[in-house]
Amino acid sequence: MTDPRLTNEDLAPLKKQTWGSYNIFAFWMSDVHSVGGYLTAGSLFALGLTSWQVFVCLIAGICLVQFFCNLVAKPSQVTGVPYPVISRVSFGVLGANIPAIIRGLIAVAWYGVQTFLAAESLNIVFLKLWPGLGPWADADVHGFLGLSLLGYVSFAILWVAQAALFWRGMETIRKFIDLAGPAVYVTMLALCIYLLVKSDFAIDLNLSNHTLSGWTTVGTMLGAIALVVSYFSGPMLNFGDFARYGKSFDSVKKGNFWGLPVNFVFFSLLTVLTAGATVPVYGELLTDPIKTVERIDSTFAILLGAATFVTATVGINIVANFISPAFDFSHVSPQKISWRMGGMIAAVGSVILTPWNWYNNDTAIHYTLGILGALIGPLFGILIADFYLIRKQKVVVDDLFTMEESGEYYYRKGYNPVAVQSVIAAGLVSVASVLVPRWIGTALWISDYSWFIGCGIGFAVYTVLAKRADVGARVAVPATAAA
């Protein structure tokens, strides 16, 4: 019997799954095409890698992301439920709030940061149209709590715009990301061609200022691959929030193929060519697209470029940092918090964080996101181990929504001790891999692999403990797609 404490209209299995492969492809375009994605691809050259080495790392990293996304997509696609609900299988009907809250808090932090970055792009538009606003863009002259008055105006405009888009529901969001991704491509391609022509195509694709050799090169390449995976670790964990809408698992896999390796490599090529062209054109390497656009003489080009990066940032913010906490916070109290209300809680929380101050504090970012981010790996490992190894891809959908003690996912008072123990054990090691090297000032490369460390240990510990506790022994019903 369905318990109202565990469900509402947003968390229940979908009655109709309508997304095709293009919708999943467009989702990834919105997730990739952002200032953060641009900077991540360009930053690999700062590690000392050559052009071909960077592309090997990008392709290897994104193929791993594709593989992991296919794994995490299946349980949600076949059952039609979002990430926090499918987490009940491994954590218990109440214990699933643990991964939900962790993922939700990470999304809230990044939601504020991405809105702030988009506001910076919007500031460029205002200052170009009305140069007299300059003093109002200076936090020291007209500012409050570290942000200028113009900054507050831009932040508020984007905050309201994103909230309005979100409030209209998933179908409107789907239509937005279907258009946003291609629109960003057109502008990025135009920017790239413009800079290539300005440079007479005389660019050097080796953007590194130093060279590597021997095993140092191998180690750096592995670290670069890990960086790519880590960058996508958040959306990768809760990809089920979107895969649940897929018409079929094959459609989701096809969308992942076009949206990840194909799309990401082409996007990265544009990024590298554009960054490389800034050297002969502007006399210095610019890896920030906002700063690149600012240097263009044409007012129209600046307005178009800034508007494009605003659109791109809104796109990734909606898909990566708004929808996830909406489901996560709704999951905590389904009858009191709807999907929309969960999203608004995240939006309000992002303002309280004053992300403009937080983002400029390297220590705050490292400790808060470093610790929370290190927990994404264990959560991912536990979910995959449980669904594929322990339960052999079998799920009793009805038991995801019952508080009856006889329910398969009730465990002990609604919590699975095995999952809790596993996330603590793996989480401690994963968090230590982030913090200890920083404290002792050596072996900092270990932090690059925190997601893999957490995922591997979580996967292994859960598998061993679950088999010992005979978890999943009663389940004999294969997961079936929502009708």
Image (spheres, rainbow, N blue to C red):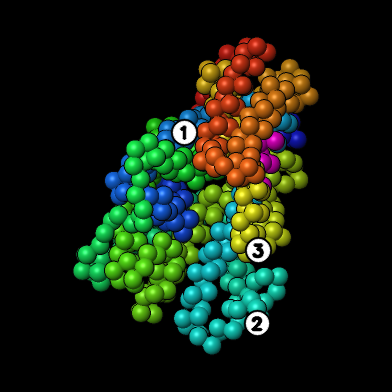
> Which residue: 42% across, 74% down?
294
The residue under label 2 is which amino acid type?
Val
Magenta stretch, main secondary structure class: helix
In terms of sequence position, does the residue under pointer 1 or pointer 3 come before the other? 1
Q: Which residue is mark 1?
A: 68
Spatial CA distance of label 1 from label 2 is 48 Å
- Mark 1: which secondary structure? helix
In terms of sequence position, does the residue under pointer 1 or pointer 2 come before the other? 1
Is 251 in front, or is 187? 187
Q: Which residue is mark 3?
A: 357
Q: Using the image, tell me which numbered label, if any, was put on residue 393.
A: none
Q: Nearer the viewer, mark 1 or mark 2?
A: 2
* 447 on left or right of 417: left
| Residue 325 visible (yes or no) | no
The residue under label 1 is which amino acid type?
Phe
* Neighbours of disc 2 within 10 Å: few (<14), some (14-19), many (20+): few
* Neighbours of disc 3 within 10 Å: few (<14), some (14-19), many (20+): few
Taking the magenta stretch, the answer to whether it contains residue 201 is no
* 34 on left or right of 238: left
Point out residue 218 in the picture as x, y percentages from the top left corner.
38, 37
* 350 on left or right of 223: right
Point out residue 12 in the picture as x, y percentages from the top left corner.
63, 36
Taking the magenta stretch, the answer to whether it contains residue 100 is yes
> Which residue: 37% across, 36% down?
215
For the N terminus, which image quadrant? top right
- Magenta span: 98-105
Is 95 in front, or is 448? 448
- Mark 3: which secondary structure? helix
Q: Which residue is mark 2?
A: 141
- Are circles 1 and 2 on residues that touch, CB within 8 Å? no
Spatial CA distance of label 1 from label 3 is 34 Å
